[in-house]
Amino acid sequence: MKILLATSNKHKVLEIKELLKEFEVYAFDEILKPFEIEEYGTSFKQNALIKARAVFDALNERQKNEFFVLSDDSGICVDILGGKPGIYSARFSGKGDDKSNRDELVKQMKEKGYKESKAHYMAAIAMVAFAGEFSVHGSMHGRVIDEERGENGFGYDSLFIPKGFDKTLAELSNDEKNQISHRFKALQNAKFILKNIKKVYNEK
């Protein structure tokens, strides 16, 4: 069984490949010509399923019997901002780059008079194959601060300090982050499904 990731985010591809070492994993653009997918859902789960379905539908019949499409939709939810940016994390600033999104987050916190706030990362993993559709979740709680620290990671990692730590995610090693991250937890849950589905593929 081969897994096709429904994402063009290179950071996510590397992270997911590292976390799913026991599977044969391919990036979206290794198999298909990249195309835009409109994320019109109102939750992480809905958007993850939308992306996974779109990629699965783009496969030919042979590929549909060969690949299991996996999609991740994730983001950060900040308490003082009423849960924003949430599902809009990747496009919070309207400019489409991580630095602008982080700057917008800090700006909105400061406008409310806060230098930090409780927050949590949420990840939804959707899986689509001939065998059906599945979804799982994972979360990581902590707090966001108003200054960037660390060079590792991506997204809002340099602003987020996980619960029980005094370093931001961007100050942790990849191994340290992968043991506690929302995506790691969601993928651990997904592995139970993937291993069972793998048996079905092997029997085909």
Image (cartoon, rainbow, N blue to C red):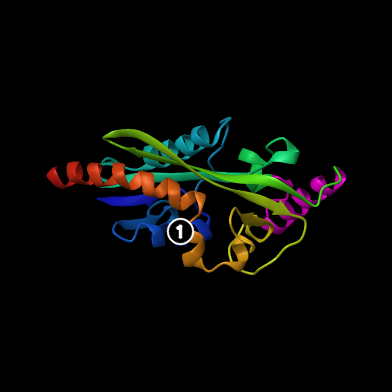
Foreground pick, 18 / 119: 119
Instruction: Identify the residue shown where x is 68% and y is 45%.
Output: 118
Query: Taking 130 as reference, is 117 left or right?
Result: right
Q: Residue at x 16, y 47 (%)?
A: 202
Place of residue 111 in the rendered image (x, y in percent of width and height, measured from the top left)? 86, 45
- Could you tell me what secondary structure mostly forms the magenta stretch? helix
Of 111 and 72, the residue lying toward us: 111
Q: Where residue 89 sits in the image (x, y, percent)?
A: 64, 45
Instruction: Locate residue 148 relative to residue 124 in the image: left or right.
Output: right
Count residues near mark 1 (Cα–Cα under 10 Å), then give few for <14, some for 14-19, many for 20+: few
- Which residue is located at x 58 percent, y 56 percent? 164
Instruction: Determine the secondary structure under disc 1.
Output: loop
Outermost top residue: 42
Locate the C terminus and report the quarter of the image it occupies.
Answer: top left
Residue nearest the observer in this picture, 46 or 187:
187
Q: Amino acid at mark 1?
A: Gln
Q: Kindly identify the residue that appears in the image at 18 percent across and 41 percent down.
A: 200
- In the image: residue 181, left or right of residue 144: left
Using residue 91 as the reference point, say whether residue 49 is left or right of it. Answer: left
Residue where numbered disc 1 is placed: 179
Residue 29 position within the rendered picture, expressed as x and y whole percent measured from the top left: 44, 55
> Taking the image as drawn, is residue 141 in sight?
yes
Q: Position of residue 45 (x, y in %)?
A: 49, 35
In the depicted structure, whether residue 31 falls above or below residue 63: below
The correct choice, above or below, for 73 with respect to 169 in the image is above
Kindly tell me whether residue 30 is visible in this rendering.
Answer: no
Q: Within the image, what quadrant is residue 157 found in? A: bottom right
Q: Is residue 165 magenta?
A: no
Magenta span: 92-111
* Count of all numbered marks drawn on residues in the image: 1
Kindly indicate the quadrant of the structure image that contains residue 77.
top right
